[in-house]
Image (spheres, rainbow, N blue to C red):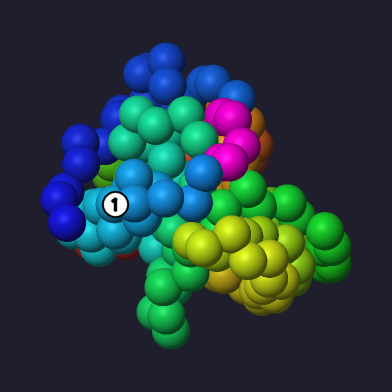
């Protein structure tokens, strides 16, 4: 496994529509392993392949319970709405308020090409939406209602 360089906002890779994965081979598995390591190194809860310069529909998410690998993910249901703080490893040290569904269900393939459905609530739903947006070249700042700032005590407000 290896830590890959995270592309920072302004990099054109972050604005591309990514192509579907067709081959579930060793190259994909290495990408997934590297993405997970890169996400953990950056203390993120999700990472999408274009953030490491790979224009394929591949996402990793870990909101604290377990690692999920989503290949060619499609959000198939959503409900509710929550306005909450959000950040991105491609925009280090910045946070903003974004409205996201309270719950989502996403259909995806695992690293071997087997389809599964993942349901998420709260932070997990937010991460799923945020990472799927990356695959279509969308960043959270496209949706942000206001950016947060640190007050004198270091709290984000
Ligand atoms: Ni992001």
Task: Give the camera-side residue of 114 and 124.
Answer: 114
Task: Give the camera-side residue of 86 and 79.
Answer: 79
Q: Residue furthest left?
A: 2
Above or below 87: residue 13: above
* Residue 14 place in picture, x, y as percent: 45, 26
Residue range (magenta)? 18-22
Does 100 appear in magenta?
Answer: no
Which residue is tagged 1?
A: 30
157 displayed left or right of 34: right
Does 19 appear in magenta?
Answer: yes
Dominant SS of magenta comes to loop
Above or below 67: residue 88: above
| Residue at figure coordinates x 42%, y 50% from the top left | 25
Q: Is residue 140 visible?
A: no
| Residue at figure coordinates x 61%, y 37% from the top left | 20
Secondary-structure class at tag 1 = helix
Q: Residue furthest bottom?
A: 65
Residue 43: image quadrant is bottom left
Residue 143: image quadrant is top right
Above or below 123: residue 93: above
Residue 114: image quadrant is bottom right
* Residue 72 place in picture, x, y as percent: 63, 48
* Residue 36 place in picture, x, y as percent: 31, 60
**The C terminus: image quadrant:** bottom left
* Residue 59 place in picture, x, y as percent: 49, 52
74 displayed left or right of 93: right
Above or below 144: residue 110: below
| Residue at figure coordinates x 52%, y 63% from the top left | 112
């Amino acid at each position: 496994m290896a830590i890959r360089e995270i592309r920072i906002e302004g990099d054109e890779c972050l604005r591309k529509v990514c192509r579907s994965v067709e081959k579930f081979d060793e190259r994909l598995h290495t990408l997934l392993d590297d993405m997970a390591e890169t996400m953990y190194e950056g203390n993120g809860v999700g990472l999408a392949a274009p953030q490491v310069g790979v224009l394929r529909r591949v996402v990793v998410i870990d909101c604290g319970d377990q690692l999920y690998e989503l290949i060619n993910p499609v959000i198939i249901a959503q409900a509710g709405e929550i306005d909450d703080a959000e950040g991105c490893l491609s925009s280090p040290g910045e946070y903003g308020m974004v409205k996201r569904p309270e719950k989502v269900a996403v259909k995806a393939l695992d690293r071997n090409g087997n389809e599964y459905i993942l349901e998420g609530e709260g932070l997990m739903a937010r991460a799923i939406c945020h990472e799927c947006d990356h695959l279509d070249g969308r960043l959270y700042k496209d949706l942000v209602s206001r950016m947060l700032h640190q007050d004198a005590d270091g709290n984000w407000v």
